[in-house]
Amino acid sequence: MLSAAAQNPRPLLQRGGRKFNLQKCRRSRHFYHSVQAVSSFYPQSETLSSPSSSSEILTIRKSLLSRERKAVEIAQNYLNRLRSTEPQIRSFLHISQNVMSEAEQIDRKIERNEELGPLAGVLIGVKDNICTVDMPSTGGSRILENYRPTFDATAVRKLRECGAIIVGKTNMDEFGMGSTTENSGFQVTANPWNAERVPGGSSGGSAAAVSARQCVASLGSDTGGSVRQPAAFCGVVGMKPTYGRVSRYGLMAYASSLDVIGCFGSSVADAAILLEAIAGHDRFDATSSKREVPEFTSQLEAAEFLDSKPLKGLRVGVISETLGDGVDSGIVSSIQAAASHLEELGCTVKEVNMPSFSLGLPAYYILASCESSSNLSRYDGIRYGNQIAAEELTSLYGACRANGFGSEVKMRILMGTYALSAGYYDAYYKRAQQVRTLVQKNLKATLTENDVLISPAAPSPAYRMGEKKNDPLAMYAGDIMTVNVNLAGIPALVVPCGFSEVGPSGLPIGLQIIGAAFDEAKLFKVGHIFERTLQRCRFVPPLVDKDV
Amino acid sequence: MIMASICSRVVFSRSLLLCPSAFLTRRNGALFCTMQSSGTQTVTKGEMSKTPMEALPRKQTKVHEGMLKDYEAVIGIETHVQLSTLTKAFCSCPYMYGSQPNSTICPVCMGLPGALPVLNSKVIEFAVKVGLALNCELSLNSKFDRKQYFYPDLPKGYQISQFDIPIARNGFVDLDLPIEFGGGHRRFGITRVHMEEDAGKLLHSENGTGSQERTFFYKLSPGLGSNMKCFAMVTEFAVASFQYFDSIVDFNRAGVPLLEIVSEPDIRSGLEAAEYAAEIQRLVRYLGVSNGNMQEGSLRCDVNVSVRPIGQLEFGTKVEIKNMNSFSAMHRAIDFEISRQAVLHNEGQVDEIVQETRLWDEGAQRTITMRTKEGLADYRYFPEPDLPEVSLTREYVDKISASLPELPEMKRRRYEKMGLSMQDVLFLANDVNVCNFFDAAVEKGADVKMAANWIMGDIAAYLKNERFCINEIKLTPEELAELISSIKNGIISGKIGKEILLELVAKGGTVKAIIEEKDLITDPVEIEKMVEEVIAENPKQLEQYREGKTRLQGFFAGQVMKASKGKANPVLLNKILLEKLNANS
């Protein structure tokens, strides 16, 4: 498998092409039926008084400011749930010892009537590839077992400055390489909706933790869909911002030109609050943008003030290539229903074609592997991390890396090293860059004709554990919905939009809303209105539903 | 392109091969090795000379000039210049040569997970200056690339460098060869100039166990300034694992900006090569972008040498020479290598010239094999995604261009036009500080030739004895000009001038004040009185003088000088004396 993939990108291309070249799909018929036609996909049984999508962060803030609840109570509540669910979910690699003491500090601030940061008392989980000075940061890799950074990532520093309490470090596929979190060097995380399913990846721990309400919100990172796909699998909101919107300083690099820190929340508003806190230029990251960060949250309207057509005139393009062969029928219907829903909200919805859509996947895997083969060179056991005794230099490197890296990471390092080798550079790296430019142009053009584009976040609901373990190409193919967005560097928001089937075994499905560069505000607005008007859906897993 | 790192690499594997008994233990996360190291400070020296693979150039001493005439050497040089920016290329760490190991490091230059490089804009400015000074075409749009290889002194596993689009290319440098070697003007092509970062340095432990150094390192940590607190943690935490076999890695130098200057293969002899390197040194010093110090490693040259029979078009097999710590070492190393290869050609053993890297052994005065079988290293370059592309505007370049100082070549041509001999020109233009001093003195009205002579004579001697630089002495160019005009106008003698100069150089002050202090007699009446007294006291000599023995004028002058205790103005004295002696004849 490895050598086949490494020596020739064609199998990837062909497979992706065959599976996802959806030109032939049957969408000539009326694609968007009325909401009634597809509403059967929503669980009918649940009748809820309050939607699950109200902002937990705003609720916490309100109750703290009104002194209705203390920060320690809120923190204790979350920690209790974390302790009770963690044995099943295993989303955390490390849990902070300081949660209660930090909550106490918030309470003291409230007592002294001091100003509270926008995230005061909010428990936030941080993906383990984002450096935290007070907790180990391993990137999910054994090679960094017990490694403690000497600095906080800029995003983490900003969260702390806003009063957030970092609750712990969440599990992930080693260095972000994987789509199931099964490639973690330490543990496997379960999907809170179904313990036999994966939470997605690579930010599976962060998604599962928010889904299981182990924390209020969390940070992840998205190189090829690592925030959006797990958000979809776990039924939470996931935001992948524009490349450069959030500083990468302190994010362990996987593929530097694609990596971006993203946010998870149980509502669009929470994701928006979180992004507002961490976004902005950073002098420690030369690729971070100097663009001003808008106030995302102030633009979100309360549901009760929405008129009947709150999204009137918004041009929505449904990427037709994402709704054809190889995509689960449940997913297709859910997205069609979501499209109808948007139409009802006043949007003009039409199908759009993206000829370069299926090209993105192989290009992504070449570029990401190339960059990762370079980025992971620093893990050599000389300056930090585990060092293995050896007799001479080459064996020292060999032993450290052979012991420290998992098989998926080794495979991608090999693929990347191969693709960058003399004589192959033009055929792989350079060609992939050309494809990247093509995808960028294509998406940019489509986004000038449409305000947002929609697609599924993944071609299927959460996989069974082990399902993709021995078939890396199938796992890679699962990233088809998300990688183009990374190649283009544009933002995308994933909002839960339905379930794979009716009843308790239904798994959440995510709607991906793609916008133009630095247009996160529009995505939040669309996502927020969509979420607040989505009827009869409650995205709280049964596991924790009773106490939320 | 840059082979320095590779050099060290091989040293290690070989030294380990040479000590098969080396066994390693692991304690406290650090590796220790029981084998003894040679105790040298840097990796590139010492052990190498013991390698058994040495192929000695036979009959080296018997090379006669005649044989060399049939061959031509082709030489190209890669020069690494360390830029003297206040901070490193991609982080805000300072760099000072000789700092305690690992005292100027941070997450960025240590390559810690999550750290990112941010370009120091001074690096671009300095690179543009050098590019312009070397008459290069500048790339208004260039980029950084990653050059990948593993070595313990390379924190990230790749070096940030420039690959296919260097900041400057296709330039040339002009220079004048020294008169003592026959002189002559040369122009050598410059292929490219690119920016990159330096790697760390491996230090051998003295006792082989490394434990002392480890203690030493731990002691260092509290000493790092308060703003370096987190870096101290880096140091402390990382020290245990910095230890690599019998070496310690010092990362102070990691991330220091370098310019790599690659010459065309235009150079033909050791002398030309040494002069080329010296000109690069002058240039970077004139520009103020580097101290160009070879001993400190701020200027490093790797030389490629091949030899071919005269008339042959294609190049011979090239050999790379490293480890030359001075221009004269370069000169000798290259000339040695040329004759070594020429002898092999001459004896029909061209096959024995193999593509290899050789080291200059200063002790033995010869080059020795460091490693053969130069495999084509695959550095897997690709564009550095962490840094935006480098875009220069025309205005920016023009502004720098306008601010460039007068460069050595322009200086030399100007001095030549001023009427100075080539010897003087080369001496003065060699050192930017000397030039500035000379130019200032001339501007203050000093006679050109006299100023040059004083600087090259007494001042240079003083500088040499006291190991001073010309701007460290108390003498100002203004006073040198004053001194010269005082001598020229006869106010003081050359001899007194020399005394005054030495005083000015050591203690400072003004020429006028020293003349006054010395109480020099410049009053003609007073001198006349003394002259008359001396003539009156020596009637016999006066008679002889008037009989034609005019040589005795010197005797009288000496007597007057003696009487004035050396303070009489010599010009005045001689004038009056002559008048008196010839008065009644």
Image: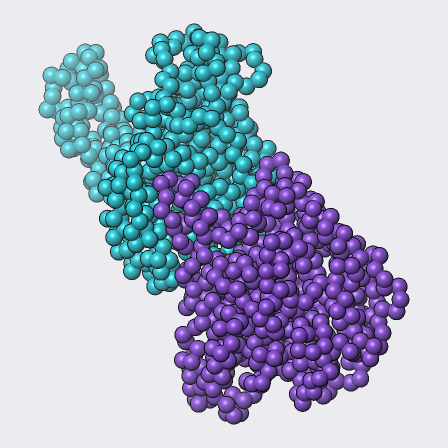
Which of the two residues, B98 or A212, is positioned nearer the viewer here? A212
Q: B335 left or right of A193?
A: left
- Identify the residue at horizontal 78%, vertical 63% (top origin): A323
Quarter of the rendering containing residue A9: top right
Task: Tell me the quarter of the picture where residue B139 sits.
Answer: top right
Residue A136 appears left or right of A3: left
- Using residue A197 as the reference point, say whether residue B248 is left or right of it: left
Residue B578: image x %, image y %? 24, 22
Q: Left or right of A56: which side holds B532?
A: left
Chain letter, colour cyan in render: B
- Of all residues shown, which one is farthest toward the right? A29
Q: Residue at x 57, y 17 (%)?
A: B314
The residue at 57%/49% (across/down) is A412
The tint chain A carries is purple
The residue that appears at 21% across and 33% down in the rendered structure is B568
The tally of labels here is 0
Q: Is residue A506 above or below residue B535?
A: below
Q: Position of residue A357 (x, y in %)?
A: 75, 55
Colour treatment of the image: by chain
Front residue (pair B69, B528) = B69
Residue A370 shows in this picture: no
- Residue B400 position, x and y percent, is 55, 46
Where does residue A99 sit, x and y in percent of width and height? Answer: 44, 77
Relative to residue A217, is residue B389 depicted above or below?
above
> For this rendering, which residue is in front, A483 or B161?
A483
Q: Examine the rendering and report whether any part of residue B297 can be seen.
A: yes
Point out the image quarter for the C terminus of chain A.
Answer: bottom right
